[in-house]
Image: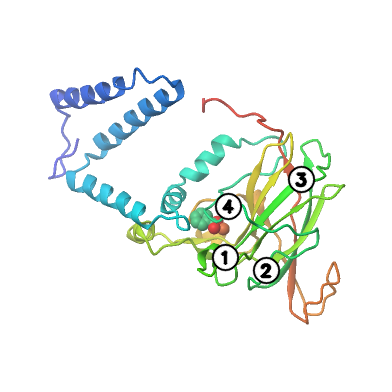
């Protein structure tokens, strides 16, 4: 223990016993929980929370500030704005949960954070179609294959893709109800897919609320590395939620605000000069465009999920 004058002193054993007894009593209060898993979660959360409070010697003012912070997160949250997901993301709690539940499996594509902007209502497009739906940005041809870890194509795999426009906003962040920068499509009989998206650009997570204030207080940037979201589902395969990132994006070195970047997900987006013929003869009226390739390998369903970390 450190006193306010900075000198260390041994903790008072009576005080330690009082604090430990409270922790033990609260842990014991969950002993009749019928659901074993809930019992484990509540007991462990209690131990970790008490241990945090005791370790940092949390003041009553700090606890009040924490309650006020969580209250503000609740007040700003609605069906379009989810401050608690942002909070989980900036603590790396979302990515840690992804890591625990999507263990590496051979050459399977790595998963990353889901984020708050997926919606169920994305229109279907054919292979080679355009996801933009009016979202602004540089057209980008995206293609690849979906295979199993044994290299077998996965025909008919469902691919959801979504991304922000070049102003840094998802459709859901506009109040006009537009659906743009998102779609779903299906891999063809050879497990191949392709679509026109937009070359991703960096953008901040919503930072005009309590989570943004917290990031400012700790001198951290809200900006995410440029990315394009994917969710791929196929019978018998583990659902993959991931993104691809843009090789050379300086934000990768600066740091992604939600810790989502993995080296294996950084892809080359190759710039094409205006007038370069497009893969499916799309007329881009002389605009520059880009292309990238993302070959996706799906792990088998429930493949290799460990029950505990040790
Ligand atoms: C996103 O990828 O859009 C995102 C992820 C985490 C928090 C906010 C946004
Ligand atoms: Fe995103």
Q: Residues within 10 Å of mark 2 (few under 14, many from 20)?
A: some
Q: Whole-percent x and y of residue 17?
A: 18, 22
**Camera-nearest label, 1 or 4:** 1
Give coordinates of residue 267: x percent, y percent.
69, 57
Residue 134 position by quadrant: bottom right
Mark 4 in CB contact with mark 2 (< 8 angstroms) = no
Per the image, label 1 sits on a secondary structure element best described as helix
Residue toward you, 52 or 180: 180
Q: Is mark 4 within 8 Å of ligand 1?
A: no
Instruction: Work out whether mark 2 precedes mark 3 in sequence or the reverse, and give the earlier one.
Output: 2
Assign a secondary structure to mark 4: loop
Which label number is shown at residue 157? 3
| CB atoms of marks 3 and 1 within 8 Å | no
- The local crowd at label 1, few if under 14, some if 14 to 19, many if 20 or more residues have their Cα within 10 Å, is many
Cα distance in 3D space between marks 1 and 2? 10 Å
Residue under numbered circle 2: 133
Q: Residue 236 versus residue 271: which sits nearer the camera? A: 236
For marks 3 and 1, give the CA distance.
25 Å
Pair 2/3: label in front: 2
Look at discs 4 and 2 and give the one toward the viewer: 2
Q: Which is nearer the N-term, disc 4 or disc 2?
A: 2
Secondary structure, mark 3, is loop
Label disc, if present, on residue 261 of the rendered structure: 4
Residue 224 visible in this rendered orientation of the protein: yes
Residue under the point 74% across and 73% down: 289
The answer to whether 121 appears left or right of 2 in the picture is right
For numbered disc 2, what is the local secondary structure?
loop
Q: Quadrant of residue 209?
A: bottom left
27 is higher (above) or lower (below) than 79: above
Tell which tag, 4 or 3, sits nearer the viewer: 3
| Residue located beneath label 1 in the image | 171
Q: Position of residue 56 (x, y in %)?
A: 25, 40
């Amino acid at each position: 223990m450190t006193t306010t004058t900075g000198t260390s002193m041994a903790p008072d054993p009576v005080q330690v016993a009082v604090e430990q007894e409270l922790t033990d009593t609260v842990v014991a209060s969950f002993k009749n929980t019928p659901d074993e898993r809930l019992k484990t979660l509540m007991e462990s959360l209690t131990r970790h929370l008490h241990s945090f409070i005791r370790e940092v010697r949390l003041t009553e003012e700090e606890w009040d500030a924490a309650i006020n912070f969580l209250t503000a997160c609740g007040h700003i949250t609605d069906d379009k704005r989810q401050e608690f997901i942002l909070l989980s993301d900036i603590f790396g709690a979302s990515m840690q949960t992804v890591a625990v539940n999507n263990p590496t499996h051979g050459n399977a594509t790595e998963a990353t954070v889901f984020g708050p902007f997926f919606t169920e209502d994305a229109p279907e497009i054919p292979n080679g179609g355009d996801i933009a739906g009016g979202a602004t940005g540089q057209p980008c041809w995206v293609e690849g294959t979906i295979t199993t870890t044994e290299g077998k194509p996965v025909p008919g795999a469902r691919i959801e893709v979504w991304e922000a426009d070049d102003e840094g906003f998802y459709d859901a962040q506009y109040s006009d109800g537009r659906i743009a920068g998102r779609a779903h499509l299906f891999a063809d009989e050879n497990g191949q897919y392709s679509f026109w998206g937009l070359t991703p650009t960096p953008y901040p997570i919503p930072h005009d609320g309590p989570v943004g204030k917290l990031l400012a207080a700790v001198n951290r940037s809200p900006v995410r590395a440029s990315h394009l979201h994917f969710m791929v589902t196929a019978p018998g395969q583990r659902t993959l939620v991931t993104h691809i990132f843009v090789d050379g994006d300086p934000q990768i070195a600066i740091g992604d605000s939600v810790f989502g970047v993995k080296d294996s997900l950084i892809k080359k987006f190759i710039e094409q000069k205006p007038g370069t013929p497009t893969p499916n003869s799309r007329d881009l009226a002389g605009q520059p465009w880009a292309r990238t390739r993302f070959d996706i390998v799906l792990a088998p369903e429930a493949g290799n999920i460990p029950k505990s970390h040790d």
